Image (tube, rainbow, N blue to C red):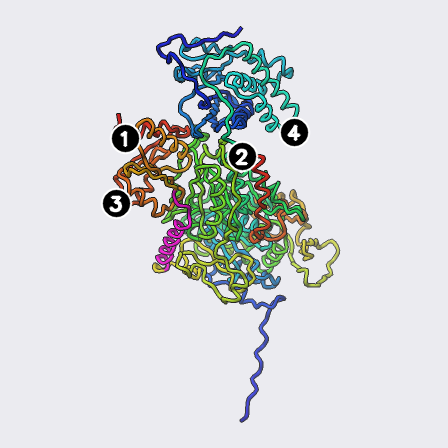
Amino acid sequence: MATTAVPPAPPKKVNRIGLDIATYKGSKSTLCAGCGHNAISERIVEAFYELGIEPHRVAKLSGIGCSSKSPAYFLGSAFGLNAVHGRMAPVATGTMLANRTLLAIGVSGDGDTASIGMGGFVHLMRRNLPVIYIIEDNGVYGLTKGQFSATADLGSKLKTGVVNDLPPIDTCALAILLGATYVARSFSGDKRQLLALLEGAVAHRGTSMLDVISPCVTFNDHEGSTKSYSYVKDHDEPLADVTFVPYFQDISVDYEPGTVTEIEMHDGSRIVLKKLATNYDPTSKGEALRILTEAHDKNEIVTGLFYVDTKRENFLDLLNIVDEPLATLPESRVRPPKQVLDEIMVELM
Amino acid sequence: MATIHVAAQESEVPAEPQQVLNDLSIQIATVNGSGSQTANTVLLRSIFQMGIPVSGKNLFPSNIAGLPTWFTIRASKHGYIGRKKEIDFLVAMNPETAEEDVRELRAGSAVVYDERLNLNRLRNDLTFYPVPFDQLVAPICPDAKLRKLVRNMIYDGVLAKLLGVEMEEIQKALQKQFRRKAKAADLNWNAAKAGYEFAEKNLQKGDHFSLQRMDETRGKIIIDGNSATALGAMFAGVTVVTWYPITPSSTVCETLIEYMKRYRIDPETKKATFAIVQAEDELAAIGMALGAGWAGARSMTATSGPGISLMAEFTGFGYYAEIPAVLFNIQRVGPSTGLPTRTAQGDVLSTAVLSHGDTKHPLFFPCSVEECFSMAIDAFDLAEELQTPVFVMSDLDLGMNNWMANPFSYPSKPMSRGKVLSKEDLDRLGRFERYRDVEGDGVGYRTLPGTNHPAAGYFTRGSGHNEKAHYSERPEDYVNNMERLVRKFKTASRLMPGPVLQESRKKEIGIIAYGTSHWALIEALDQLKQEYDIEASYLRVRAFPFNEQVRDFVRRHARVYVVDQNRDAQMAQLLRLDVEAEEVTKLRSVLHYSGLPIDARSVTDAIVSQEGVK
């Protein structure tokens, strides 16, 4: 009998550790269609896929809010902990203390961070805990139907016509002041920049704080809002063109001298910043704070990598924790022998 | 020259005062920040070293310097180490409180006091021993700045002479206190000697109390409950400790830091096999502990009432998400300023059901420093076995005071890490369902982040999830989960330590107590028997949820007194929820909530009065 040759299925596209992109996806998003948070989840999927991160090494942490639901929508085979409102920072801290070999990615919102979670946020920044801290920033409380958050701009209007009469908290400026060592702002609509900044954050071994402006299509995408798609597109001033070159890719690009700043990350990856309007040095705190202050004054939204310090000791090194996960140290290493108890008892007699 | 004032009104004092040997309480009234702690600790230790059972209690203000502080030392040949209500010997060093302190004494008591205070004018039924502290301290301590600190040591010498404390033991205790500070030890020793010599030359014994060597403390240790808790945590193999300072719990973690630095540094790498983090607040402290527990560490926090309140939301999350962590609650009196440095069993009810929604938590009730140690170890095992936050309910009296005890026993069982699936387990099983009750004990299997298996990862949430840990708001999933959590709580009552029973033959009066009330109780039982011929049974609760033995005890007795160191009879309330309806009326209360540790006399009086005994 004649047989017809079935053409072999085209090989599934896989990343450098042999996993396909589906492995990096999560469950179907229940957020509104067009929500900026979904675009951020997509970039996270892309970044982790491209870099070939093993999902089992990833801990996804979040608080409460629309933003904090999103860890369910990426890296479905990773471990996730959706905690309580405003407390992503402490659970991320505890997780990394327990197992320093994990890669922690925390997703929070502007309400979750800049109001109820402010205490945890500032102290995490100060500790330089190795974690990717993403704020999905839309200026409103979405899940409670549209109240202002503390990152809403002065004069910004709610759908109901209420005008915000308090100045915004700039989480990037705060993070820089407090000691975070990789601080950036991006826009959920800027795929290329956001992906590069996320990949840089994965390579960084300290606190990476990414404030991603992520419009809320339901409660804050109207005329008068300063966090709507159209407003952000019109006012976005990227500091530099960002490219991330992972350590496992041997790419060298020629640039005109003086137009590029390169930052070498701990693992040998590089972040290449190509000059746009002005030359920007992301290793100066003072410069970063000046840019952010001026942008506020001019009603501009500056995006890009504001500050990076690859030298500062991270919190886990500072605590001098053993290299292995504390969580699984064997009893012989965590319960001192009987003779130690005897010695202590004699001292107390 | 100093003069002696012996009681003049014979009618108020027995004509032939009985000599009282090895049975007295000394109260030392000072101002906080005056360095009296050394003198008090040395005195306590000296009596201990003489083989006499002894206990010490520090009643101190919420203040760093300048407010009244009282330290009471009780020596008891009977081995009673609870607080004694009556003061036999007062050392009055604080001008602010001296007059009131003297007025409160019983006739026949004695007062050592700073001569300048002229206290002898106040009463004529006490023995007064005036001591010129300033004159005595000047020649032995030329440095005027140090005088304030050394001055108190003089009363140790005076008491040594008056009561018969051996000076060699004072010297030994001083050496222990100032291990590597020979100069300080010498200075203090000279002060003690000056006091002793002064008393020898100038004071004539007028009271009838004395101390004499016994052999009842050999092989015993002295330690405070918080240090015992810290030791328990270290030997439990704790790896992540996250805390926020609050009196009276701070010394749990501070002492733990010292021990861990000594005994938990990896000998090869010189790195720590632990992480201790002072958090930004209690919300963060419990959040970190739960994050660490979720990731598989043995994690803990220590706090007190206000901190417990702040941890409420996260505790409920831990209960629903089923994350282990151990919370040490060193209980105290209520909120804010006032009495935060005073003891109470203040949080029994609120901790049992801490948080929102339907929640209930396992609680351990240690009564002694031995139990602070052993229950800390049990609590870490239980938290991981049950995958839930577990509380150890100590209190200020237990935590911050020095207690005499038997040396602690090394854990007899290996660490029990609960139902955790490894990569190899998953290779074998292929899959797992996080919240499925496989064994019927209400506890599911979990995996730890980092487990290298494609089926290992799962998503942890609060109240809405099905057995597979998938998001669910379906009523049947919720009910199913809630019922499993009830099964888990039943498992807790099986795994936790049962009560300790001391049964009388008469099944009439039962007494239920817990925690530090135990020490008043054992003495009160003797008082009831000796003074009123009342024989009562005694049950000491060691854990919540209660087990069947507790319910049986209530069933067996006609009247059951529940002793609580709080106003609202918190343990009695918990019991009322637990026993059968017809048993509820049997429950009566003995309440003590003055901020002072409970004493036997108060318990005895309360029971006698409710029993209607004349």
Q: Give the residue at mark 2.
A: B219
In front: label 3 or label 2: 2
Quarter assignment of residue B502: top left
Residue B189 covered by magenta stretch:
no
Q: What residue type is labelled 2?
A: Gly
Magenta stretch bounds: B477-499
Image marks 1 and 2: residues in contact by CB distance under 8 Å: no
Both marks 3 and 1 on one chain? yes
Chain hosting mark 1: B
Q: What residue type is labelled 3?
A: Ala
* Mark 3 nearby-residue class (10 Å; few <14, some 14–19, many ≥20): few
Type of residue at label 1? Answer: Gln
Q: Answer left or right for B375 relative to B594.
A: right
The residue tagged 3 is B581
Q: What residue type is labelled 4?
A: Arg
Residue matched to label 1: B610
Q: What element carries label 4?
A: loop
The residue indicated by pointer 4 is: B180
